[in-house]
Amino acid sequence: MKLARTLRLDVSDQNVFERPAPSGEWAISGGFEFSNWTEQDLKGKAKQAFSNGWYSVESGGRASFVGVTQITASELEQLRQTLAATFVEIYGAPSLDAAYPVACEEIEQMSAMCEDFEDNTLLMVSRELSDMGVQETYRSRAPESASLEAFAVHGSYD
């Protein structure tokens, strides 16, 4: 099974998100966080999180990029439990029993998207508000083989 992990390609996430996600955390779209937002909510760093941020399940932070990778069954179950607890503790779900199926659905939605991509594919999300609510679109960048020239320094120490 595949899912995505947050990536930090540079320091920009630290500057644009209120709570930047550390690199390597499991990520989902996280559009649920914006379900009741209006144009008045779209200001500053909150707007950036809305517009381009993936949601890190472990920290609740946001990342501009995620990378597709494999997830084990035990990691997946821990992630479901963590997200269900977040729904109760932060978003007001009435109980873990009520939150768990919703957490499973959120994670399954992300996993289904990731299954269409090879490992190490970069994913980006864009959101906008419409009359129908939050609309998400996704972009991808396939992994590329790097040649030795990308890493080697040619020349001499003379």
Image (cartoon, grey):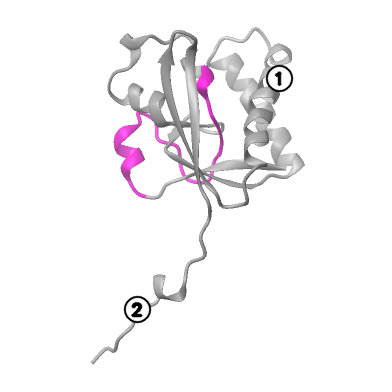
Answer with the quarter of the image where residue 25 lies. top right
Answer with the quarter of the image where residue 61 lies. top left
Please name the amino acid that badge 2 sits on. Answer: Val
Query: Is residue 151 in view from this perspective?
Result: no
Task: Give the labeled residue for mark 2.
Answer: 153
- At x 41%, y 31%, the residue is 52
Query: Residue 38: percent from the left, percent from the top?
Result: 38, 9
> Quick check: 128 left or right of 121?
left
- At x 48%, y 20%, the residue is 135
Magenta stretch, residue numbers = 10-32
Of the numbered discs 2 and 1, the one sitting upstream in the chain is: 1
> Quick check: 44 left or right of 147?
left
- The numbered disc on residue 81 is none
Distance from disc 2 to disc 1, alpha carbons, whole Å, reads: 51 Å
Q: Nearer the viewer, residue 134 or 2?
A: 134
Indicate the quadrant containing the C terminus: top left, top right, bottom left or bottom right: bottom left
Task: Give the labeled residue for mark 1.
Answer: 100
Query: Residue 63: percent from the left, percent from the top?
Result: 44, 37
How many marks do you count on the picture?
Answer: 2
Q: Residues within 10 Å of mark 2 (few under 14, many from 20)?
A: few
Query: Is residue 14 in view from this perspective?
Result: yes
Q: Residue furthest right?
A: 73
Query: Residue 131: percent from the left, percent from the top?
Result: 44, 8
